[in-house]
Amino acid sequence: MTLVALTGRTVAFLVATEGVEQVELTSPWQAVAEAGGTPRLLSTQPGRVRAVRHFVPADTFAVDDVVGEVGPERYDGLVLPGGVANPDLLRTDRAAVAFVRALCASGRPVAVICHGPWTLVEADAVRGRTLTSWPSVRTDLVNAGAHWVDEEVHVCREGLGVLVSSRGPDDLPVFNDTVVTEFAHAAAARRH
């Protein structure tokens, strides 16, 4: 993998206005940027979002795009960070769910970590897919038609687009490397 593996590629990071686990946003964001990609922060409202560190309020981050005002065609991939409140809030937002559903249906790559799959469940984007998550999300995924595995990172190629998933913050090093590699491969495949 080269350091410019994602040059010219824009990756959406979709989060609610509060409750995203900070390291699950900032660590993959940095990996995408270091690989030459352009990360963009999407949220349900303009302004700033408040991250958390295990339920404790943490830093705020400026929103680049509002999910109800942009379409998935603007992005080459999607990252859904976790945190407990973040995906719970996203899955109740119609525009966020519609965005995720449309992006998944387009075949663009998606990466999700921790509790993030709740948004994919609401978008009906896990049926027939294999992924991992925070252990407490397992039943929700299985009930939504997914196959759940307990792995550091899992890459699912069954269905439209690659789906990269990890369990939580401890898995971030391998998650980040896999996101960059798989998003770069998907970008190269779309060019051809």
Image (cartoon, rainbow, N blue to C red):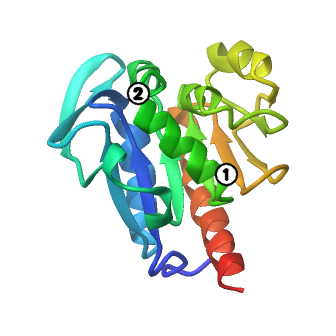
Question: For the point 75% across and 22% down, which residue is it?
Answer: 144
Residue 80 seen: yes
Q: Nearer the viewer, residue 30 or 107?
A: 107
The disc labelled 2 sits on which kind of residue? Answer: Asp
Secondary structure of the residue carrying tag 1 is helix
Q: Quadrant of the C terminus?
A: bottom right
| Numbered badge on residue 105 | 1
Spot occupied by residue 170 in the image (x, y as percentages of width and height): 55, 35
Secondary structure of the residue carrying tag 2 is loop
Q: Is residue 49 left or right of residue 144?
A: left
Task: Quote the CA–CA distance across marks 1 and 2.
Answer: 18 Å
Spot occupied by residue 175 in the image (x, y as percentages of width and height): 60, 49
Q: Quadrant of the N terminus?
A: bottom right
Spot occupied by residue 174 in the image (x, y as percentages of width and height): 62, 50
Q: Which image quadrant for residue 52? A: top left
Q: Is residue 160 left or right of residue 181?
A: right
| Numbered badge on residue 93 | 2
The disc labelled 1 sits on which kind of residue? Answer: Ala
* Disc nearer the start of the sequence (1/2): 2
Identify the residue at the far left of this view: 47
Identify the residue at the far bottom of this view: 192
Q: Dot 1, how many residues are within 10 Å of its Cα: few (below 14), some (14-19), or many (20+)?
A: some
Q: Is residue 111 left or right of residue 55?
A: right
Q: Is residue 174 left or right of residue 6?
A: right
Spot occupied by residue 130 in the image (x, y as percentages of width and height): 81, 37
Q: Which image quadrant for residue 151? A: top right
Question: For the point 72% across and 55% down, which residue is it?
Answer: 162
Question: For the point 51% across and 75% down, which residue is it?
Answer: 6
Residue 175 seen: no
Question: For the point 63% across and 60% down, which residue is it?
Answer: 108
